[in-house]
Amino acid sequence: MAELNSSMIYKQIKYFLITIFLIGITPVFYFLGAYQSELDSIQFQRQNAAKHQINYSQKEVYSIASQLGTSLKLLSDNRVLLQFIQKPSLKNRELLESLWALTVTNYSYISQVRFIGVDGKEISRINEDNNKATVTPSNELQDKSNRDYFIYAQTLKANTLGFFGIDLEIEHGKIVIPPKPSLRIFTPIEIDNERKGYLFFNLDIYEIVARVEASLEAGYQLEFINEEGYYLASQDKYKTLGHLISERDSYNVLIETPELWRKMKTQNVGEFYDNQFFYSFSKIKLDGDVGSSSLYLILTSDNSLEITNLDHKLTFIIYESIMAMIFIITISIVIARYIAKHRTTSLESQLALAALNGMSAIVITDKNNRIIKVNEEFTRLSGWREEDVIGRTPSMFQSGKHNKDFYSVMWQTIQSEGLWEGEIINKRKDGNLLTKILRIQAICNHDSKKEYFIASFFDITERKELENRLRELSEKDSLTQCWNRRRFECELSNIIANDSFPKEIESSCLAIIDIDYFKRINDKYGHDIGDKVITEVGRILGEESRHNDFVARIGGEEFAIILPNTQLQEAEIILNRLRIAVNLYIDIKVTISGGITDICNSREASYKRADLALYESKTAGRDQISCFSSDEMAQIA
């Protein structure tokens, strides 16, 4: 008997060693490789994230410079300015200053718009402060003839754009306090080849930095550095402008981080890190038609943030490997005892085998659909720990995205076929939604009665989000980035389907807009200018409309706007405002005509009325908005 027990123990040990070797060798190499891979990839991930952020910042700065250069040239060629120069009446001055006020309101980083005569004296000037545009009285206009930037502006040829490096704002010969760094862009103004003056934009560097930083991920600080290493703009404003303010001259990258500065002087783009911070830098050049201004962008992030993230990931890998080894040892003991004693397959071994083969998140419930077991992958994906869910039903994970019929069909399938597979949206512990592929399998006892249910799933949330983003791209017009006609038809159908149209409830309106004499524009200026006109009209309609209005391009030069919860009279006011905005903002003479109607329970009828109203605007001379309500249509019918 003792020899039999010794033989059984010997066999169990032998089977255990063989089993643990066969099962454990792959996970051991896997976790060792994962651990080393995480160590090797963390620096690459850090550099990738930094490159992405610095590239985005650089593109944002260039985008701002391009927008302002375009806006400056548009204003310099605008007939309002030319009329003021030729006839500087009070009415023309007020019209010019109103146009400039709109410009500084739209671009918060423009601190001043000025027209300076050929003698260096300011003729007109608009200041921006706290999103408020103010006109400088005539008696406060100054003589700038001795300023470096004006002397440089005199060297520019006609129709050219110039940049002047970052400098302090000076009013009446004194530096503005607190110091305010500005970047100036300007262009000459000429009429019949005779120079009349210069149009200037003063740009608030702090506003530009704030604009770029607002679009960055959390944890990054943006700073502008000049070619001598001094700070031009930073969150800490007291260390800026050391090259102009003597008491700040110690704030210099060369002094503070010499190794970073050496790398910046030898590379236009790169990264550098020390024990405390991680730096990513890029040299940018703001080019005008004549001359340029160069500076560095530096993004700084806390090095410890990435180290903390690394520690967390490594700890998680170690924890997973320990849990996996415990699991493997346990399974190996069970398998060894099973082989040694020739035990028949039991219900418990079936459950263990199913858990062993499962590589996804697992939830096991009893015959009453009460949760009795979950695995670690389930906790990772859902956020629910085992002690939070034991004894409860899976209905606690419902997101509200599926109706009762959905769950009824699911359980009918499980009861009849013993298996259900499909896509479902559940709720995580933190309230966020989890889209997953779910498989529920019934486990039966010897009497073929269902004793347990094993649910396994894997997360497809990111894939679904990507599909939704791609779907949105397919619904945008490639030229104007407005919604396309297909999306417009869907939106109009949804408005009609979701609206019962009782008179006491505020109605929605539909507007159709057409660019007047667009064929003439194409014939006169060419199709490339025609495309730019369409693009600019689409941009103005999108930016000047309300945030809940739906703007779509439905034809060549035809646009449609759905105005939800809007009365016809209010819609007419809004469309006239858009019409005026197109007249003001587009360089060449462009007008639009439009037709408006209230949306009824027929998509075709609503569209037809709006089209008839548009036709009325065109026959009445264009550059106007007409209305055609459903009540008028009923009276005609």
Image (cartoon, rainbow, N blue to C red):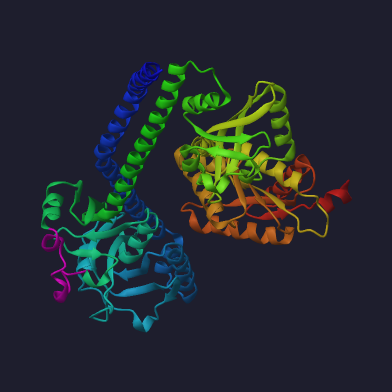
Comparing 603 with 316, the one in front is 316
Q: Is residue 409 magenta?
A: no
Vertical placement of residue 81 versus 368, above or below:
below
What residue is drawn where x is 69% and y is 58%?
571
Residue stretch in magenta: 240-257
Residue 116 drawn at (x, y percent): 31, 70
Q: Is residue 418 left or right of residue 259?
A: right
**On-image quarter of the N terminus:** top left
Q: Is residue 186 left or right of residue 428?
A: left
What residue is drawn where x is 46% and y is 29%?
359
Comparing 366 with 568, the one in front is 366
Vertical placement of residue 618 versus 574, above or below:
above
Residue 312 drawn at (x, y percent): 33, 47
Vertical placement of residue 413 versus 229, above or below:
above
- The count of marks equals 0
Magenta stretch mostly in which secondary structure? loop
Comparing 537 with 564, the one in front is 564
Q: Is residue 248 magenta?
A: yes
Residue 149 drawn at (x, y percent): 22, 66
**On-image quarter of the C terminus:** top right
Residue 324 appears in view:
yes
Vertical placement of residue 600 versus 554, above or below:
below
Residue 474 appears in view:
no
Q: Quadrant of residue 24?
A: top left
Residue 224 drawn at (x, y percent): 25, 60
What residue is drawn where x is 69% and y is 54%?
564
Residue that sits furthest to the bottom in the current view: 139
Comparing 334 with 593, the one in front is 334
Q: Is residue 98 left or right of residue 404?
A: left
